[in-house]
Amino acid sequence: MFKQGYYVTAELQVKTGKKAADARIALKQLCEQTEAKEPGCSLFRAHYFPDQENKFLLWERFENKAAFDQHFIEQHTLDYLALGLTEVVQFFQTDIV
C-alpha cells in the first residue's frame, strides 16, 4: 500500500487569536487541492485531536524533496499560508523502512 517517498508529519497549532473552526475548514480545502493539483503528492491529510481543538497533524507523502518544495510555491498553498491561521510546532521527515 505504501511505498518509499518523502513522508512528512507536521504538528500544527492554531495561532493565538485565530479560530480552530476556520483552521479546520481551510486545512480541509488545502488537503483537497493539494491531492488534486499536485502530481508529486500522493497523500496530504489533516487530522484533528478531538480533545484539543487547536491542534492538528498533517500526514503527507511526496515523491521526493523536489515535489515537497514545489508544494510551497503552489497558489493553493500560498493562499492557505496567507490566512495566517496555524503555525508548525514540530516537523518530521521520514521514509518507509
Image (cartoon, helix red, strand yellow):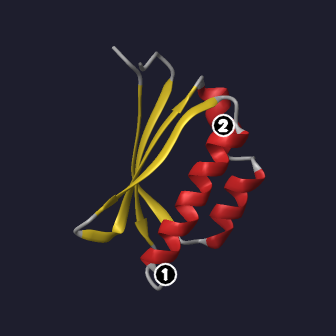
Q: Residue at x 59, y 71 (%)?
A: 84
**Residue topped by disc 2:** 69
Q: Secondary structure at mark 2?
A: helix
Image quadrant where one finds the N terminus:
top left
Image quadrant where one finds the C terminus:
top left
For residue 25, side relative to residue 83 (left or right): left
**Quarter assignment of residue 28:** bottom right
Q: Position of residue 4 (x, y in %)?
A: 47, 16
Q: Nearer the viewer, mark 2 or mark 1?
A: 1
Q: Residue at x 46, y 81 (%)?
A: 19
Q: Residue at x 68, y 68 (%)?
A: 82
Asked if residue 75 is positioned above or below residue 59 in the image, the reply reads below
Mark 2 is on which residue type?
Asp
**Residue topped by disc 1:** 18
Q: Residue at x 71, y 63 (%)?
A: 79
Q: Nearer the viewer, residue 21 or 69?
A: 21
